[in-house]
Amino acid sequence: MNANDSQQAKVSTPLPTREGKGGGSLSILHQYFGFSSFRGIQEEIIESIGAGRDTLGLMPTGGGKSITFQVPALAMDGICLVISPLIALMKDQVAHLRERGIKAAAVYTGMTHDEIIVALENCIFGNYKFLYVSPERLHSELFQAKLAHMKVSFITVDEAHCISQWGYDFRPSYTEIVQIRKLLPKAPVLALTATATPAVVEDIQRQLGFREPNVKRMSFVRSNLAYAVERVTTTKEQTVLELLQQHPGSAIVYTRSRIATYELAAWLSSQGVSATHFHAGLTHREKTERADAWQRGDIRVIVATNAFGMGIDKPDVRCVIHFDIPDSPEAYFQEAGRAGRDGERADAILLYDERSVAVLKRRIEDTFPPEEYVAQVYEDVCCFLQMAMGDGRGVTREFALEQFCQAFKHFPVRAYNALQLLSRAGYIEWADAEENHSRVMMTCQRHEFYTFQLSPAMERVVHYLLRTCTGIFSEYAYIDEKEMAATLGMPEQLVSEQLVELSRRHILRFIPRKFIPYITFVQRRVEREEIMLPKTVYADRKREMAERVETMVGYLLTPECRSVYLVAYFGEKDAKACGVCDNCRSGGKDRPTLSPEEEKALCQRILDYVEKEHVTSLTQIHFPDVPDSLLGELLHRLMMEERLPSFLT
């Protein structure tokens, strides 16, 4: 079961198929996923795509997105093409579908040519129901040639906001999707996203070539989720500990720094709180072990970067704490929304201190460094990879960011973002490191094993593979040498040696795991002065990020219901106060009614205090006789009117 579907009621006895409209879908829902009924707008979306209509589904985190394409795909003839940017989530969903006896495959960056051929051939001839692909694969001639031989029922575009240049997470590779539509003119499109402003909603439909506008919306209000903002007066670490003591149960603490995940998790453990850390730099095995331990409840708290959370299957998260302020309301809404998916009361708490707002605003300059700097990084990359002027078109080279930064004296964060900008501008394609499992596939028939002279160690390895890897004669299977070694009672090195030897003897194909980032030059190398970043890649997106940052600062200071503030950003203007956030709980009791003259005098008092006391942070502004809600409201007003010094806002 996918985490998004955790609130749906499970049944243990067969259900009669509903007569009439939607009956087949309900039967499939029960047969494969064990749920007794749809919830929210799931059935609306399923009926819409089943009728062949292009459909955009807006569902907040926890809304049950996967059900909306998995159920109709099983009800329709052919294969569902699922486009997703999240390789880890693709792998997880394919694994979950296979566990249910549903044939599914995935094609993504990092697979070998042979693996891709096997997967695509299986989708043509093997009666598969789902093919997951990363958007980068769509322009491949091989992929498009094989796709032409598949009977595609419909196309699902997950994380559809990535196609919009007005979205917070634009991916240029998503623009290839409309070309795929031309190859599959009869296949409708189902676009799904958990975060989209009204402008993004319109842009998604335009970019995907919708035949007619068709949006299914689910309210973004989470009535059981209590939002709160906590101004730190001691240390953030101590505040996190106190909050965890006040909010028992499973928790996620989000922080932006990989080092901070380790340090905070270690400190919490030293204080008697069961905690572990998680970030993108861990090996696949480490990620799996830590996520599984947390989901089982063996570990109470997981301290993580935003690399954690997509596809998690844990409905009973009682608390999500943000150690740092996210860059955008979209990111915050998604991450906070991982609390309370079981419908029970949960808390989402955002911490800030005197440095937080300044740090947040500095991220704009880090994410969008000066254009001259971006051009310099391009030239340095070309030198680092020994790419001659005028050469390079279509050339792919391994690229170690850390070594590059050391060699050319670049700060990793700025260099990373410069590479992202160069990629979006079409000069390079840069794939960050993604560790893959080792993979194997048998190249001989089962009966042929008796003709080979195998050592006892080889026989044990082969028998293990035949016993544990289903479909190994027709497709690649993922393996974990460490787990194999533990099961077989053999050293891991010996297991690897046997796999290499079996591959050398053409008994199987063995692809060891790798952890290699690379750069592909999309066009020939040009002079530094020729590097131009389009307005849509640089200036527009920098401005949009600044606007999102201002929205997050406004969230810190707003006196209104925090839920109303957030959902209004996504276009839901008529939401009612939640009654459970920190602002609602205060009930306005600490917000005295002031006359216009009194408010004007208090604003002037704030401005005078800032100037006289040489204030360097908003959090330093505190008057014992003025309630925090009123002070926050006036600070927000002064900030919007640009009457406060720029370094404060």
Image (spheres, rainbow, N blue to C red):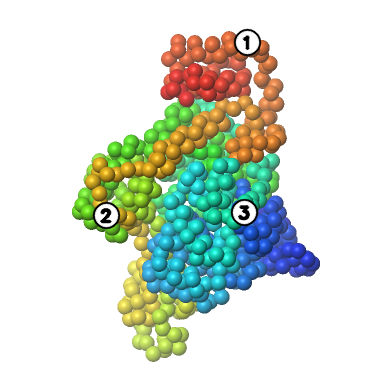
Q: Residue 564, position in %: x, y?
A: 65, 34
Q: CA distance from mark 1 to mark 3?
A: 53 Å
**Can residue 97 be seen from the camera position used here?**
no
Which residue position is annotated with label 1?
598
Q: Is residue 129 left or right of residue 588?
A: left
Q: Which amino acid is tagged 2? A: Arg
Q: Residue 522, position in %: x, y?
A: 32, 55
Question: How would you rate the neighbour count of disc 2 (Cα within 10 Å): few for under 14, some for 14-19, many for 20 or more?
Answer: some
- Label 2, secondary structure: give it: loop
Question: How would you rate the neighbour count of disc 3 (Cα within 10 Å): few for under 14, some for 14-19, many for 20 or more?
Answer: few
Q: Earlier in the sequence, mark 2 or mark 3?
A: 3
Which quarter of the figure has residue 528? top left
- Label 1, secondary structure: give it: helix
Q: Residue 445, position in %: x, y?
A: 44, 85
Q: CA distance from mark 2 to mark 3?
A: 40 Å
Q: CA distance from mark 1 to mark 2?
A: 65 Å
Which residue position is annotated with label 3?
212
Q: Residue at x 58, y 71 (%)?
A: 78
Question: How would you rate the neighbour count of disc 1 (Cα within 10 Å): few for under 14, some for 14-19, many for 20 or more?
Answer: few
Q: Is residue 58 above or below residue 567?
A: below
* Circle on res. 559: none
Q: Is residue 168 left or right of residue 35?
A: left
Residue that lies at the very extreme toward the bottom in this rendered image: 451
Q: Is residue 348 above or below residue 74?
A: above
Q: Which amino acid is tagged 1? A: Glu
Q: Earlier in the sequence, mark 1 or mark 3?
A: 3
Which residue position is annotated with label 2?
524
Q: Residue at x 23, y 56 (%)?
A: 391
Q: Earlier in the sequence, mark 1 or mark 2?
A: 2
